Image: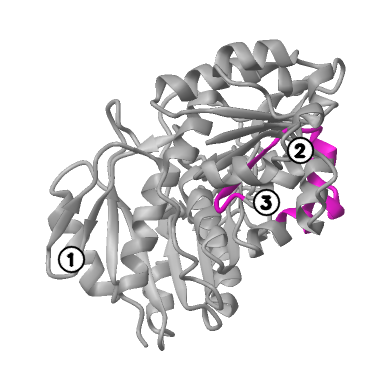
Amino acid sequence: MVLGVTGGLAAIKAPSLVRRLREAGVEVRVAATDDALRFVPALSLAAVSGAEVFDRDAWFRPDGEARHLSLARWADAMLVAPATADALAAAASGRAHDPVAALALSVPRVAYAPAMNAAMWRAPAVVRNVARLREDGREVLEPAVGPLGTVGEGEGAGRLPDEASLVDALLRTPRPRDLVGRRVLVSAGPTREWLDPVRFLSNPSSGRMGFCVAEAARDRGASVEVVHGPVSVPVPHGVATCAVESAEEMLEALVPRFDACDLLVMSAAVADWRPRERKAEKEPKRDGDAALELVRTPDLLETLAGRRARQTTVGFAMETDQGVARAAEKARRKGLAFIALNYPAGEESAFGGDATRLTFVTPDGVAEELPHLRKREAAERLLDRAVATFVA
């Protein structure tokens, strides 16, 4: 494969990324722009890759060989990391003004790993360019969230993803664009049921699993909407979102969107109970015990099932005991294609982390247990199964 390095501060990570790729058994060649070579020397990139760097000086050989064509024929994939805002703009418009851009036009599979300031990543022009690249079948990874490289810029979405994530993305089998023309609706994150102005009932859901489903559906060509509660991770790039708090608010947002969708993935961790009465003022601390009267929140999937026409619906269930039996009963009662069963405790807890262990359970109790996977890969497996159940 070819690693394309463009001119952002994250270019200094390129030699380490080349090493990680080679450790994973990948043969690597490096292409670099002039600006990238201001951050990292060509000699360093050549030393770690074991091959001459494809830069402007090496574009054409004395014998007339056009290296952007011969290297493209050699490569089965290309990863552009870091991909600056300028690199994304060039790719989206089909420019071939530098070695990386020219090479990317000819390699069959190209993935871009953006790295830039958070404000730039959110800019409408960048959003349009990313959407165009995805429509063209190119992979654009989500940047990581954390401290930004430039002093004084704080934290945000814009960091180059970690090396392990980049290697995983490159080695992952590309999924088909089998959701082009489909509408996918996803619920994500927790809900909150307020006791008083400062206290609420909720759970530790981060929203990451639902957002991974949304990202995977987007990359497979779907038009995606996400209705989410108060999440602790950035919302996906390039999908429509609607933020809510309570279970009732989530239901109100889902109902009109459900009628138009082809696939609903209900991954939100919706609170089952709310206080019968929400206090207008903070309840003061008192000596002794106190009792809290709770009432059920609406059952979102059950309500939506009554409106179901042609939609495929997939639910999530979190259980601590008799998980498969309970998930199968829930799938039968709510008319689901299947349920993704997960667990809240132990090292493989679904809450908060980047990985999970899912078991797909059908209404008749057939269970397919997945290995412990990153949530994005688990989302791809879920969509593989959902697409196979679509009603023609």
- Between residues 219 and 148, which one lies in front from this camera angle? 219
| Residue 42 locus on image (x, y percent) | 73, 16
Quadrant of res 148: top right
- Between residues 170 and 64, which one lies in front from this camera angle? 64
Tell me the amino acid under the disc marked 2: Pro
Query: Which residue position is annotated with label 2?
Result: 99
Give me the residue at 35% from left, 84% from top.
391
Q: Is mark 2 on a helix, strand or loop?
A: helix
Say if 373 sits above or below 293 in the image: above
Figure disc tally = 3
Give me the residue at 12% from left, 63% from top.
365
| Residue 47 locus on image (x, y percent) | 60, 11
Q: Which of marks 1 and 3 is in front?
A: 3
Give me the residue at 49% from left, 39% from top.
170
Q: Is residue 8 left or right of residue 184?
A: right
Say if 221 sits above or below 99 in the image: below
In the image, is residue 128 part of the stretch drawn in magenta?
A: yes
Say if 80 sits above or below 342 in the image: above
The label shown at residue 237 is 3
Q: Is residue 105 left or right of residue 389?
A: right
